[in-house]
Image (spheres, grey):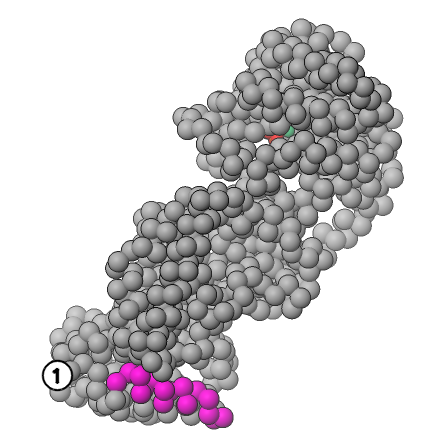
Amino acid sequence: MRAVLGGGPRLLLRRLREVMAEPVSAQARLDKIVVLIASNMVAEVCSVYVLRADATLELFATEGLNREAVHLTTMRSGEGLVGLIAQRAEPLALSEAQAHPAFSYKPETGEEIYHSFLGVPILRGGNTLGVLVVQNRASRTYSEEEVEALQVTSMLLAEMIASGELQSIVRPGDDIALHRPLALTGTAISDGIGLGHVVLHEPRVVVKQLVAENVSGEMRRLDAAIEDMRENLNRLIEQGDILGTGEHRDVLEAMRMVANDRGWMRRLREAIATGLTAEAAVESVQNDARAKLQRSTDPYMRDRLHDLDDLANRLLHKLTGQSFVVDRASMPDNAILVARTMGPAVLLEYERARLRGLVLEEGGPSSHVAIVARALGIPAVGEVANITDLVETGDAIIVDGTSGDVRVRPQSDVENAYAEKARLRARRQEQYQKLRDVPAVTRDGIEIKLHMNAGLLVDLPHVAETGAASIGLFRTELQFMLAARFPRMREQFNLYRTVLEAVPDRPVTFRTLDIGSDKVLPYMEKMEEDNPALGWRAIRIGLDRPALLRLQLRALLRAAVGRHLRIMFPMVACCAEFDAAKGIVAREVAYLKKHGYATPSALELGVMIEVPSLLFELDAICAKADFLSVGSNDLVQYLFAADRDNKRVADRFDVLSPPALRALATIAGAGHAAGKPVTLCGEMGGKPLEALALAAIGYRSLSMAPASIGPVKATLIAADLAETEAFLTPLVGAHDGMPSLRAHLRDYAEKSGIPV
Ligand code: PEP
Ligand code: MG
């Protein structure tokens, strides 16, 4: 028997479209739809089951089964044939349904007289929203075409469910699954709490035209769009100039591979042949692929899903002419951006005032977009699996960038709790704001200078906002990481000049390029190293590629004409490296003078203490350097041989342990003895309890993220430093194998009324 009967899927789709447009109630519409499908498929039964938030499938409409069963018959996902389809997200066709081991009998439906059964999942974005079933009294075999026809039809139902229309016919408390609240967890990448509404960074295309008027016309449209997309991909790959979009070369290569995949092309053509428009065919094929791949636990397969998704998305945008980017003007002013991945430059293009948060499927704490999110003060959570498939534009959403929690469509009590948390935070910020112009002087009169770390133009207003002493670490590599190619001398000069102008009366400490390891420049040839953290990075690159370093030094020296300039070098491992770096600076200064250029009024050259070897050469390095800055992030990672970005080991060892604190105290002591200023600019300096410990072991200057200045200041001004030192010194000096002094110090702070 020829597959699709009663006029074929095209006629059915057209009729269904008409029904979708009729001004009738949701229930009446569903009732009409099942009648139409049953008659078109020459089936005695057609039923629609919708997945509820409690993972139960509820019969929402039927033609052929007992009408009384509608909204009464339910089954759990995984229970019975319908439950099995929902769970596997795959069609099921049986000529003898009752012989299937999963068959479960629901007496109220009267379905025992039907022998054959065909059911397909109702899918959207790879998620199951329900199940569509046809049944026949006679025992018969459903053809592949019939399965496909029913799948196509189910897309319409998916649209209807997603539109929210069915919400009007659910019983209170029986929300449909698509609108259920979700509690997800990812990795906290930028502090803060944001409440708002979802804005999909790459808006999902809504396919409105499902039914093709002319099959060969649709084939031509598909071919043209694919050809166009292939050319586009080739161009992007050739240009290699793709930074800022979050697309790296290998992603594009993978997409190109899929675009040339014969199986994929064949499936698209087959879908068009059933009567779909080119865009509906892309959506249908992609729905299928998603449902299959999402259930895969193989990371390689999941990556392929991303490539496929990207490709399908591009194709859909091309075919429908819908914009690939959010219409910025129509963004709500409490937008929470949701994206699979995002380049840092793209985030900067959004209007900051409208952004309340960011949620990404990819992107860990050291990703570039995370750096920018922190600089902009946008609460952000990364590594949230599947988030783009789990939300719809406009959904209510909460981002907790401190804990890594994301709540989608939260219930009102959850929303209230977070709103309260956000208010508390805001109140605390206000308190810190009041401390802005108060110097960080301890109760016993010791001043600790609190500087801030920066690296982007968007950081600069924070100097005034936080009352920072100055910029204690300007990470120059961020500009390089965000650029599409090596920044030219003029571009570097402009940035440094702008930074110096933003802090007119105090010296700013610039760090020379610290690239390599986790800091990757996409346009620089990738080095394959087994241990990049121990590899060719930072000053090692600078000394091996002096042209690069010289260019940067020249830009710095020229930008700071007439100013007090401080430059420091990262990852110095021995005195000879520092000597070599100083030699390059001296040559640059001589060059500028020789050519009649003005130079800075004062120049200080410092060394970052990040490699433990320098701890055993402290006197020598102090004699050579004008100042020291402890990069505790790296120093601690090398001291404990624990990768700072590896979640498994990063928190295994505590910076507040006697060995770490003794190392840090030794550096501060050597600096003081030599009369050389010492600052600490790693993350620990920005944590109140750690900052208290650092002050107690001799640090008088710290540099930290802007948001940390208020909390650290509040801690320090409440402390009596002599007393804290007297408490901590014996603990740090004790050789009793204590893994951490954290609990002791916290206890001490609480008893002494020091907020930490
Ligand atoms: C550090 O290592 O502590 C530091 C400040 O440098 P970065 O975090 O940029 O490596
Ligand atoms: Mg470092």
Q: Quadrant of residue 399?
A: bottom right
Residue nearest the observer in this picture, 301 or 116: 301
Q: Where is residue 735 in the image (x, y as percent from the top left)?
A: 58, 14
Q: Residue at x 36, y 82 (%)?
A: 213
* Residue under label 1: 1
Percent position of residue 714, x then y: 79, 38
Which residue is more in the foreground, 511 or 58? 511
Q: Can residue 583 be seen in this view?
A: yes
> Crowdedness of circle 1 by 10 Å Cα count: few (<14), some, many (20+)?
few
**Three-letter amino acid code of the residue under disc 1:** Met
Q: Is residue 112 above or below residue 622?
A: below
352 left or right, relative to 212: right
Q: In which quarter of the image is the N terminus?
A: bottom left
Q: Specify the farthest residue to the front.
A: 595
Say if the magenta span includes residue 235: no
x%, y% of residue 152? 32, 76
At x 87% / y 39%, what residue is drawn?
A: 437
209 vs 648: above or below: below
Report x, y in % for residue 138: 13, 87
What residue is shown at x 60% (from left), y 68% (from top)?
412
Q: In this view, does 259 lie to the left or right of 497?
A: left
| Residue appearing at x 58%, y 63% in the figure | 326
Which corner quadrant holds the C terminus?
top right
Describe residue 445's horizontal placement relative to residue 400 as left or right. Answer: right
Q: Give the range drawn in magenta.
A: 8-24
